[in-house]
């Protein structure tokens, strides 16, 4: 057994700072659980950040070589984020025989295969529990505790920013632009919120989860994406009336057509366990045999994420003590096709503005029928507009390509003035 294992941290931002605190505040428990003391040997930061760390009594450097060439450092903890230079830093650490922990969903979702190959070649551990769902344990449960299962579905609310925004819009009818400004003021949304509101952040996370759940590599670019920028308080209010909540859902399903993997806003039935997940919280819902259903819930970002990072470090230290690092390698031994989004199946909510005159509903129902879209309900709603009426259509389950065809046909129908929104129903 090693009495002390030394680690190198890359980055001392929100998560890095929290990792430093947790290693200090929980030192005794961590030492007992790892059967070893875990020490931070060096921290890579920008040159101007060094004095602040030194003042706090912490080691710091702006030269990555110092960490790479330090034989005492057995674990590199990458908390810089993004692709460059993080990916190269990870590969270099592995090439130097160092185990790697990361919270970086971008590199895992885009370059997972390359990173796992490098980890295997160097017989080291590459752990990334914090990359999906922040502090929520989901990677190790999928890779270890659920391996007896045949998993058919993984659904996630994996972006706290958009979940906060949709929750606020639902609570008080605030519009998208206002709620985005509020979220930015509270620090929940970034100054450039594109990755969150356009679904890219969630797409990276579901690519990682799908790869592990179905043992088949799913990359970020395989995920079909739709964000929340077009969601209005009206849609959210209709959802409520009809027994749903609006959520940005990350979906991964495995069927005979391949893997259906996408991020899109949905009308989610109020009874679904994920419907209760509000604010900045995240949750991942897993369906499989024999587990049936399980849900993992918790804080998806920020300081609590150190829980996942430090637990990964402890896991590696245990491995080092038993001479058994490198056990959790790549698990993608299948190559299932990705189901084209046009072939995916859902019910849909469609909100339209139409002329208020006899025969209009008939024409609309016929238009849907002509492209094989069967309607479950048509609700005539707000009539306060002169000569126009808003209607809400809920379809039975249909292929996405039929909904696209319906939209094309409705657009040229003279009685249809506007198609406000089309949202999947789960
Ligand atoms: N921006 C992400 C979110 C957190 O809003 O959940 C980091 O993945």
Image: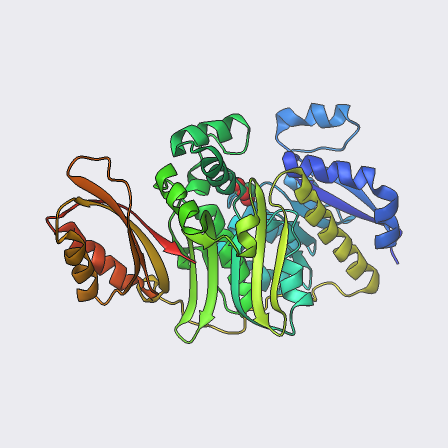
* Percent x, y of residue 160: 54, 42
Find the residue positioned furthest to the bottom.
256
* Percent x, y of residue 238: 37, 45
Q: In which quarter of the image is residue 19?
A: top right
Q: Quadrant of residue 385?
A: top left
Instruction: Using the image as rendered, state which of residue 152 and residue 415 is in the foreground.
Output: 415
Q: In this view, does 153 lie to the left or right of 14?
A: left
Residue sitting at x 73%, y 47%: 310
Instruction: Using the image as rendered, state which of residue 288 and residue 384 is in the foreground.
Output: 384
Looking at the picture, does residue 335 appear above or below residue 249?
below
Looking at the picture, does residue 126 appear above or below residue 14?
below
**Numbered-mark total:** 0
* Percent x, y of residue 233: 38, 37
Looking at the picture, does residue 345 appear above or below residue 379?
below
The colour style of the image is: rainbow
The quadrant of the image that shows the N terminus is bottom right
* Percent x, y of residue 117: 58, 64
- Ligand 1, image quadrant it occupies: top right
Instruction: Using the image as rendered, state which of residue 223 and residue 99 is in the foreground.
Output: 223
The answer to whether any part of residue 252 appears in the image is yes
Looking at the picture, does residue 355 appear above or below residue 385?
below
The answer to whether any part of residue 132 appears in the image is no
The quadrant of the image that shows the C terminus is bottom left
Q: In this view, does 175 lie to the left or right of 128?
A: left
Find the residue positioned furthest to the left.
414
Q: In this view, does 85 lie to the left or right of 134?
A: left
Q: Is residue 4 left or right of residue 115?
A: right
């Amino acid at each position: 057994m090693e009495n002390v294992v030394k680690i190198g941290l890359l980055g001392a931002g929100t998560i890095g700072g929290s990792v430093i605190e947790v290693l200090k505040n929980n030192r005794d428990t961590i030492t007992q659980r790892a059967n070893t003391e875990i020490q931070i040997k060096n921290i890579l930061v920008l040159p101007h950040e060094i004095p602040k760390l030194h003042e706090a009594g912490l080691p710091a450097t702006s030269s990555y070589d110092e960490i790479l060439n330090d034989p005492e450092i057995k674990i590199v903890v990458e908390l810089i984020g993004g692709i460059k230079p993080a990916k190269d830093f990870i590969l270099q650490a592995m090439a130097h025989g160092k185990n790697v922990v990361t919270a970086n969903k971008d590199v895992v979702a885009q370059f997972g295969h390359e990173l796992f190959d490098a980890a295997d070649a160097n017989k080291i551990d590459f752990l990334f529990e914090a990359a999906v769902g922040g502090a929520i344990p989901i990677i190790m449960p999928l890779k270890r505790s659920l391996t007896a299962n045949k998993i058919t579905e993984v659904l996630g609310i994996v972006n706290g920013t958009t979940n906060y925004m949709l929750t606020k819009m639902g609570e008080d009818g605030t519009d998208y632009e206002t709620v985005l400004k509020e979220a930015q003021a509270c620090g929940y949304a970034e100054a450039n919120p594109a990755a969150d509101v356009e679904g890219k952040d969630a797409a990276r996370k579901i690519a990682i989860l799908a790869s592990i759940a179905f043992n088949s590599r799913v990359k970020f670019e395989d995920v079909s994406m739709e964000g929340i920028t077009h969601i209005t308080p009206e849609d959210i209010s209709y959802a409520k009336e009809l027994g749903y909540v609006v959520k940005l859902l990350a979906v991964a399903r495995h069927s005979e057509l391949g893997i259906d993997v996408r991020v899109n806003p949905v009308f989610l039935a109020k009874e679904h366990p994920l419907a209760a997940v509000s604010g900045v919280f995240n949750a991942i819902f897993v369906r499989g045999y024999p587990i049936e259903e399980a849900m993992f819930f918790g804080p998806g970002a920020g300081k609590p994420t150190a829980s996942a990072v430090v637990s990964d470090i402890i896991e590696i230290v245990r491995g080092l003590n038993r001479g058994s690092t490198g056990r959790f390698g790549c698990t993608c031994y299948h190559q299932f096709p990705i189901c084209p989004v046009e072939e995916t199946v859902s019910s849909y909510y469609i909100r339209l503005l139409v002329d208020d005159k006899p025969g209009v509903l008939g024409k609309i129902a016929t238009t849907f029928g002509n492209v094989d879209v069967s309607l479950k309900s048509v609700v005539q709603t707000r009539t306060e507009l002169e000569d126009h009426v808003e209607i809400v259509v809920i379809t039975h389950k249909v292929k996405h390509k039929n909904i696209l065809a319906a939209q094309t046909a409705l657009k040229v129908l003279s009685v249809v003035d506007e198609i406000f929104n089309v949202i999947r129903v789960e």
